[in-house]
Amino acid sequence: MEVGEIYRYRPTGTVGKVDDVREERGKVWALLDHTKLYYDTRCLEPADESQYRKSSYKEREVDTRSSMRTIEELQQHLKDVDVSDYMPSGGG
């Protein structure tokens, strides 16, 4: 694994170019440029150039249908939720 190569993180499908490789406590970690996170290299596999698309966090589009866009919307959503729907009931 070398800096500049493209890899995919198997559990989530995240694809990115390797910006850094380091070993710590017997594990090898690779920094992917897409998320700026280190991944255990045992969970990475080589990816095709066609799977890679460089974009920054700010450039990613927000799907307004499935995400909260403002604090006010989140607060309103929390007011509308009945917490008892999510609480366990019954005896132990």
Image (tube, rainbow, N blue to C red):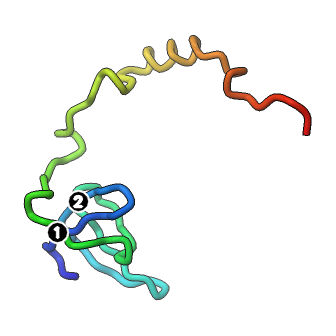
Name the residue located 67 percent from the left edge and 27 percent from the top edge.
86
Q: Which residue position holds label 1?
A: 6
Name the residue located 59 percent from the left edge and 16 percent from the top edge.
81
Q: Is residue 19 left or right of residue 30?
A: left
Looking at the image, residue 66 lies above or below residue 14: above
Name the residue located 68 percent from the left edge and 22 percent from the top edge.
85
Percent across and percent down for residue 49 are 9, 63
Can you tell which quarter of the image residue 73 is in?
top left
The answer to whether the residue labelled 2 contacts the one labelled 1, judged by CB atoms less than 8 Å apart, is: yes
Amino acid type of the residue tagged 1 in the rendering: Ile
Name the residue located 46 percent from the left edge and 88 percent from the top edge.
26
Amino acid type of the residue tagged 2 in the rendering: Val
Percent across and percent down for residue 50 are 8, 58
Q: Is residue 89 left or right of residue 34?
A: right
Quarter of the image with the C terminus is: top right
For disc 1, the neighbor class at 10 Å (few under 14, some 14 to 19, many from 20) is many
Percent across and percent down for residue 71 are 43, 21
Q: Which residue position holds label 2?
A: 15
Q: Nearer the viewer, residue 2 or 45?
A: 45
Q: Gap in Å between the C-alphas at discs 2 and 1?
A: 7 Å
Q: In what element is the residue under mark 2?
A: strand
Quarter of the image with the N terminus is: bottom left
